[in-house]
Amino acid sequence: MTTPPERLHSVESIHVARERRLRERYGGFSWGADFLGFAVANFFTVVFLALVGAIVGAVGYQMGAPAPKVGGTLSPTSQHLGVGGVIGALIAIALAYLLGGYAAGRMARFDGVKNGIGVVLWTIVVGIILGIIGAVLGTKFNVAGQLHLTIDAATLTRAGVISLVITLLVMVAAAACGGRMGAAYHRTIDREAGVT
């Protein structure tokens, strides 16, 4: 016995209305889920960056790259290792924030992209707080002075701004993608269960 088209249409409209009600009630940013996604992203950032550092160090040792001296010029091998380290660090951050965004999107269930971006927003908030603490304590602990480093403030600012923008773009793209994947997990289960 076949189901009349009117019945099929009414069932579909019920599912759509249910999804809309749930999204209105539970959608948007879930700051708790986003914070846990931020914690996941930071954990994996530390792990992946440690792996990148170990790989670059091992390759540098095998290639016989000399240890750079403060204020000295870098050898071509050290320069290539530095470029490889930067690329590896960006990949590590992308993977970490993909996982953090996935965790946030899966816990939040709705609006995965928003909650993936929420992971990055938590990172910015915590970074600002730590920056304020660093500025307050920085007058007491001058690390550059203790290590006798001469730092060109203009060069440091330019390099810092460029690296910050690139890193933020990588983090936002990866976290948003991860959040979307995390939220899609629930859609798949709902389809399999015949809920949507």
Image: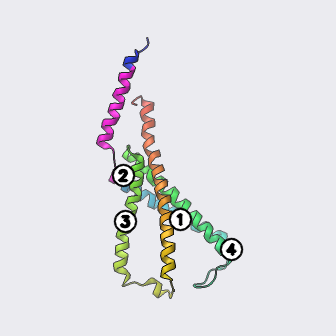
Looking at the image, is mark 2 or mark 4 earlier in the sequence?
2
Rendered residue at 46%/56% (across/down)? 172
Rendered residue at 50%/86% (across/down)? 147
Image-quadrant location for residue 68: bottom right
Q: CA distance from mark 2 to mark 1?
A: 24 Å
Q: Which residue lies under the disc numbered 4?
A: 77
Q: Which residue lies under the disc numbered 3?
A: 126
Looking at the image, is mark 3 or mark 4 earlier in the sequence?
4
* Amino acid type at image mark 1: Leu
Q: Which residues are magenta?
A: 8-31
Provide the secondary structure element on which disc 2 rests.
Answer: helix
Foreground disc of the pair 3, 2: 3
Relative vertical location of residue 27 with respect to residue 157 in this rendering, above or below: above
Crowding at label 3, few (<14), some or many (≥20) Cα neighbours within 10 Å? Answer: few
Foreground disc of the pair 3, 1: 3
Looking at the image, is mark 3 or mark 1 earlier in the sequence?
1
Q: Which residue lies under the disc numbered 2?
A: 33
Q: CA distance from mark 3 to mark 2?
A: 16 Å
